[in-house]
Amino acid sequence: MARTMARTGAVEHRVFAGRLDMRNLGRVERTTARAVRAPEGDFRDWEAVTEWAAEIADSLRAVAG
């Protein structure tokens, strides 16, 4: 990720949990998810995503002056 950030000029990188619905996966994807025992469900933290988006907006406003 550091290389991609350097190439793009990214200031920060964050990872958020997602959602896994086995019904939306193909056979190979389902097999892989089961093999690694990936839990099915919705683990998205919308409050955390919203807070991060607000931080980005504040940073952009600060740069814009």
Image (cartoon, rainbow, N blue to C red):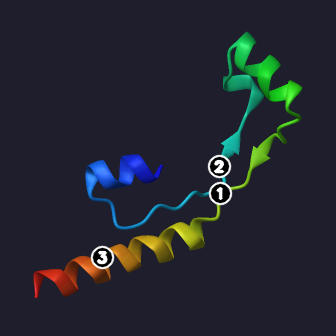
Image-based side of 11 in relation to 41, left or right: left
Mark nearer the N terminus (2 vs 1): 2
Q: Could you tell me which residue is drawn at 74 percent across and 11 percent down?
A: 27
Mark nearer the N terminus (1 vs 3): 1
Q: CA distance from mark 2 to mark 1?
A: 5 Å
Are circles 2 and 1 on residues that touch, CB within 8 Å?
yes
Q: Could you tell me which residue is drawn at 27 percent across and 58 percent down?
A: 9
Amino acid type shown at disc 3: Ala
Give the x, y percent position of residue 44: 65, 57
Amino acid type shown at disc 1: Arg
Local crowd size for mark 2, using a 10 Å CA cut-off: few (<14), some (14–19), many (≥20): few
Q: CA distance from mark 1 to mark 3?
A: 21 Å
Task: Write down the residue under mark 1.
Answer: 44
Image-based side of 14 in relation to 45, left or right: left
Q: CA distance from mark 3 to mark 2?
A: 22 Å
**Quick check: 26 above or below 62?**
above
Q: Could you tell me which residue is drawn at 27 percent across and 51 percent down?
A: 8
Query: Which of the 4 image quadrants contains residue 28?
Result: top right
Q: Could you tell me which residue is drawn at 84 percent across and 42 percent down?
A: 39
Give the x, y percent position of residue 62: 21, 87
Task: Write down the residue under mark 2.
Answer: 18
Secondary element at tag 3: helix
Task: Write down the residue under mark 3.
Answer: 57
